[in-house]
Amino acid sequence: MPDEIARLYDCYAAGLYRYALMMLADHASAEDAVQQVFSRLLSAKVLQPLAMPDHYLRRAVRNECLTLFRRGGVRRTAQGEPPT
């Protein structure tokens, strides 16, 4: 199963990072969100093949970004730039 996750990472990680960056406007937080999603996939006890992995992964990254917002780990300015 790790080979399947590695393949998914190779196919989707760059796009998921850009999506997370668009939501979070912070490079480190975007990387963390994507890494957290793939980390959870690796640690899953039962991993069934994903019928639509692009949809699943995008939703998982979106949820992780929202979790970061709720926890107060990311602040975004009106212009979408990270705060200074």
Image (cartoon, rainbow, N blue to C red):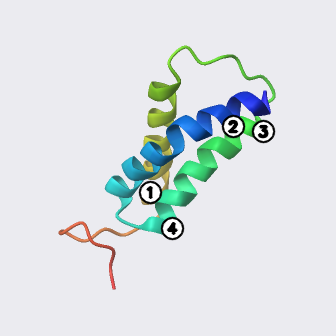
Where residue 62 appears, x then y in whole percent?
Answer: 43, 42
Secondary element type, mark 4: helix
- Occupied quadrant, residue 58: top left
Q: Residue at x 49, y 63 (%)?
A: 29
Residue that numbered label 3 is attached to? 43
Secondary element type, mark 1: helix
**N-term-proximal mark, 4 vs 2:** 2
Pair 1/3: label in front:
3
**N-term-proximal mark, 2 vs 1:** 2
Camera-nearest residue between 71 and 61: 61
- Looking at the rendered structure, the kind of residue marked 2 is Ala
Q: Residue at x 34, y 64 (%)?
A: 25
Pair 1/4: label in front:
4
Mark 3, residues whose alpha carbon is within 10 Å: few (<14), some, or many (≥20)? few
- Looking at the rendered structure, the kind of residue marked 3 is Ser
- Occupied quadrant, residue 74: bottom left
Q: Residue furthest top?
A: 51
Where residue 66 appears, x then y in whole percent?
Answer: 43, 49
Pair 3/4: label in front:
4
Residue that numbered label 4 is attached to? 28
Asked whether disc 1 touches disc 4, contact meaning CB atoms under 8 Å apart, the reply is no
- Looking at the rendered structure, the kind of residue marked 4 is Ala
Residue that numbered label 1 is attached to? 70
Where residue 56 appears, x then y in whole percent?
Answer: 50, 27
Q: Is residue 44 visible?
A: yes
Residue that numbered label 2 is attached to? 6
Pair 2/1: label in front:
2
